[in-house]
Amino acid sequence: MTSQTLPVASDNARDAGWRDVAALLGVRAGERLRKIVSVIRPLAWVLMAFAVVFWIVGASLGWKELTVTAAIVTIILMLCALFLIGRTEYDVDLDLARTRVVVGERAVGALTLSNPSTRAILPSRIVLPVGGGRGEFGIQRLAPGEKAEELFAIPTQRRGVVKVGPVSVVRGDPLGLFERAHRRDDPVDLFVHPQTVLFDGQSLGFLRDLEGLPATDLSRDDVSFHALNEYQPGDDLRHVHWRSTARTGVMMVRQYEETRRSHFVIALSRSSGDYANMADFELGVSIAGSIGLRALRDSQRVDVRVQGGELRAGTGKQLLDSLSAVENSKPRDGGIAELSGVIAATMPLASVVVLVCGPKVANDDLRVACARLPFGAKVIVVIADTTVETPALRRITDADIVSVGALAQIPLALQKVLA
């Protein structure tokens, strides 16, 4: 039985090996074919189709004109294909003078290509994607060791994260029939920060903390002793001062000053339904950035929330980088009221909450949003409305509502809130 089983197993193993080899060859052939097809432009496909048709019709009907035309088209295709032959092994260096700019600031970069080989590199075309567009540079023949440098400017009229690169070296023919592209560098991110304004800070809202500052509010349980009071129902018996109780005959308990640290939360609504236009939304982003930077300079803990997640705001650079990538969302993603609910669930100990939204938010929605926020938190609502000429202050429940029409109005608006 053994002598009959071994040959069968050996044949199966041999067949499996041949199948693996065939599959590997098929994959490599497919990759090679894709590379060949990728260099053929649409116009070349059209000319090749015409050439085939002309060859067939000319040979079957005996039309010499079609045969000559097919021959001419075939020769043109062959000559254009010869332009793909050659080396494109440049050393590419993409350098941005600054990777972080403010909207409207000038952003420039330099692209340096050098020929490290011992043979010359024929003229090539360099394609540099910049955001949604792309720039093209013509590089002449480079001798061994020779370099070529191209300077370029990047438009920064809009806030965002602009991806620069990767650099592609393109070899092709003058007629644009064939084109071979090779990527030579990794992309670089250019952060276009929103505009912000500097203003004097104010210490708003605190949380209990050993390293906090004493406040005027009194508490039954904290770490900064203030005075002794008579026991009231609900007082913690652990804070009974027994010596005073024995001396007076009345149960006395310690009273403390609350020591707090600031926990600053900024909620930026990015719902398109909250804003009248994109200008209002961009103003809202700038307002959130300005207030966040001021809070960070005051050494406060800052958290920034938008619909869909939390933004990195550990430092000013992280905050502005995060705001650069913020885009408005659809109304179905929720407005400022839903965002307030998320803050109440994830940051219940927030001491100051600044809501930033647009002028299309109704008063009822603002009332709901403020009611959902953590109890005891100082609530400020800043409405970004470019039609406002002078900051206007009003109140809804315990929240201060201020409308801001321009970035320069933020200091005046906050002065009204803190007055």
Image (cartoon, rainbow, N blue to C red):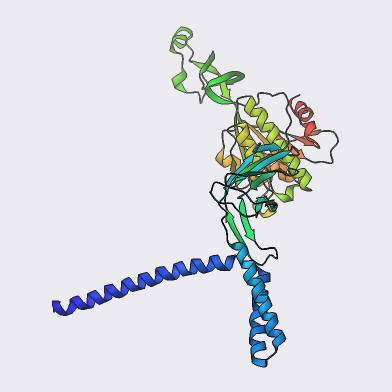
Name the image quarter holding the N terminus.
Answer: bottom left
Q: Which residue is drawn at 65% across and 28% down?
A: 295
Would you say residue 393 is visible in this rendering?
yes
The quarter of the displayed image where residue 400 is located: top right
The quarter of the displayed image where residue 281 is located: top right
Would you say residue 372 is visible in this rendering?
no
The quarter of the displayed image where residue 82 is located: bottom right
Q: Is residue 37 above or below residue 143?
A: below
Q: Residue furthest top?
A: 247
Q: Which residue lies furthest to the bottom in this view?
A: 61
Instruction: Tell whether 56 sits left or right of 158.
Output: left
Q: Residue furthest right?
A: 389
Residue sitting nearer the eye, 392 or 141: 141
Residue 223 in the image, given as x and y percentages of width and height: 50, 19
Instruction: Tell whether 231 sits left or right of 156.
Output: left
Q: In this view, does 304 lie above or below 37?
A: above
Residue sitting nearer the eye, 87 or 321: 87
Name the image quarter holding the C terminus.
Answer: top right
- Please give the count of numbered marks on the rendered protein: 0
Residue 377 in the image, given as x and y percentages of width and height: 63, 32
Q: Residue at x 58, y 56 (%)?
A: 182
Q: In this view, does 222 lie above or below 53?
A: above
Residue 402 in the image, given as x and y percentages of width and height: 77, 35
Residue 235 in the image, given as x and y percentages of width and height: 50, 23
Residue sitting nearer the eye, 369 or 120: 120
Instruction: Tell whether 256 sits left or right of 386.
Output: left
